[in-house]
Amino acid sequence: MSEDGEPRSKEVPMRLLLIRHGQTHSNVSGALDTARPGADLTDLGREQAELLVQRLVDEPIDALHASTLVRTQQTIAPLARARGLDVTIHDGLRELDAGDLEMNTDDESVELYIKVAMSWAAGQDDVRMPGGPTGAEAFGRYDRAIADIAATGSACAAVVSHGAVIRTWVAARARDVDADYAAAHPLLNTQIVKLIGDPEAGWLVEDWGW
Ligand SMILES: O=C(O)[C@H](O)COP(=O)(O)O
């Protein structure tokens, strides 16, 4: 829907605000926490979620979406209250599965997880996460979630999702950002990648890490 409540016309690109959730207890411990339901937000994470309301005050958001992991739903809750909007939950928006590396905290596991994810960002989507999905499988479910969001006719959607999947999926799908850029620019909690475009025409990055 546009600012005046009309559905977005086919000629008008949509804006997609991909937001990493607030800080969790697993972020503090450095654990590769990607399974459902996942860790809760810390007190700092809840403050970061509250701050999103003011940070996004000038954005004409008409739809809210989150993943099946509780940290994204906790992060979007203050925005949903402030805007009076419902939140649509998508399994496809959850973090890239860590497979056999799930909940590991050691440097070797974290480096391997990021290395595999970045290989997907660079187009090698037949590589498999140890005990987990291939890139084609992981990005396929994210593509479907984003296509579902775009198909609603939303003109500006706020999507609370996860650090690794946002930066690697954007690197793979946006025309102006590549895997090297994504690898060099991690997203901190509640940082946002702003995209403009649509699933058919493709996406351009308006801002990375705002
Ligand atoms: O990198 C990680 O620790 C996991 O992929 C979880 O990422 P998230 O904290 O953005 O969900």
Image: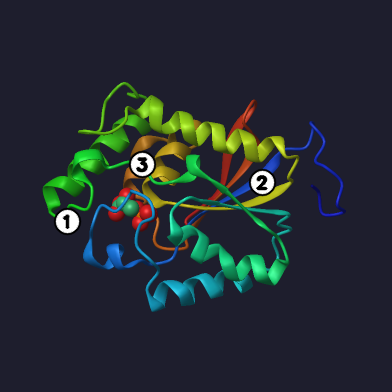
Which of the pair 56/26 is nearer the observer? 26
Residues at discs 3 and 2 in contact (Cβ within 8 Å): no
Residues at discs 3 and 1 in contact (Cβ within 8 Å): no
Q: Which residue is mark 1?
A: 105
The image quadrant of residue 84 is bottom right
> For the residues marked 3 and 1, what is the alpha-carbon distance in whole angstroms?
16 Å
Q: Position of residue 209 (x, y in %)?
A: 47, 56
Disc 1 vs disc 2: which is toward the camera?
Answer: 1
Q: Amino acid at mark 2?
A: Arg
Q: Amino acid at mark 1?
A: Thr
First in sequence: mark 1 vs mark 2: 2
Residues at discs 1 and 2 in contact (Cβ within 8 Å): no
Q: Position of residue 29 (x, y in %)?
A: 22, 65
> For the residues marked 3 and 2, what is the alpha-carbon distance in whole angstroms?
23 Å
The CB of the residue at mark 3 lies under 8 Å from ligand 1: yes
Is residue 135 visible to us here? yes
The CB of the residue at mark 2 lies under 8 Å from ligand 1: no
> For the residues marked 1 and 2, what is the alpha-carbon distance in whole angstroms?
35 Å
Q: Which residue is mark 3?
A: 96
Find numbered disc 1 in the image and state the secondary structure of the residue it sits on. Answer: loop
Q: How is the image coloured?
A: rainbow
Q: Which residue is mark 2?
A: 15
User: Is 197 drawn above or below residue 34 in the view shown?
Assistant: above
Instruction: For label 1, count other residues whose C-alpha is less than 10 Å away and answer few (under 14), some (14-19) or many (20+).
Output: some
Residue at figure coordinates x 72%, y 39% from the top left: 152
First in sequence: mark 3 vs mark 1: 3
Q: In the image, is 25 to the left or to the right of 65?
A: left
Residue at figure coordinates x 68%, y 71% from the top left: 82
First in sequence: mark 3 vs mark 2: 2
Instruction: For label 2, count other residues whose C-alpha is less than 10 Å away and answer few (under 14), some (14-19) or many (20+).
Output: many
Q: Position of residue 73 (x, y in %)?
A: 52, 60
Find numbered disc 2 in the image and state the secondary structure of the residue it sits on. Answer: strand
